[in-house]
Amino acid sequence: MITVTEGTKRLFRIVANHRIPEGKTLRLDAIGHGKNGRPLPSVRVGEPQEGDCPVRDQGNIVLYVSNAMSEAYDGCVLDLEEFPDGLRCVLGPPDAGHNARS
């Protein structure tokens, strides 16, 4: 299971309430594979797929995590990190700490 931080869930809830078309949702899914063979993570707008794991904030689903991402990144944390060009979602091990995930 991937843990999503409270701040990340709050941001996704705001985005979902104001920017996502009806019938669509935010999904954490793969956009290919890295050199290590692990899926490359991406948060995109799409439709929930069979096997997706819902992530809730205040009782509402704010993100679906694909089965492939759940398996490949089991135990990792999805967090927000500030970069010079703005906020980014980062995914990494829980013991890496904020600012060390990528």
Image (cartoon, helix red, strand yellow):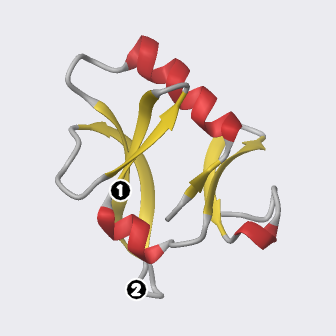
Mark 2 to mark 1 CA distance (whole Å)? 15 Å
In the depicted view, which residue is nearer to us: 85 or 99? 99
Identify the residue under disc 1.
29
- Most distant residue in the front direction: 59
Left or right for 45, reference 93:
left
Q: Position of residue 78 (x, y in %)?
A: 60, 54
Above or below: residue 51 compared with residue 17 = below
Residue 86 seen in this snapshot: no
Q: Which mark is residue 70?
A: none
Identify the residue under disc 2.
37
Residue drawn at x 79%, y 70% is 96
Dot 2, how many residues are within 10 Å of its Cα: few (below 14), some (14-19), or many (20+)?
few
Quadrant position of residue 95: bottom right
Above or below: residue 60 compared with residue 44 = above
Residue 7 seen in this snapshot: yes
| Cβ atoms at labels 2 and 1 below 8 Å apart | no
Dot 1, how many residues are within 10 Å of its Cα: few (below 14), some (14-19), or many (20+)?
many
Q: Quadrant of the C terminus?
A: bottom right
Left or right for 35, reference 21:
right
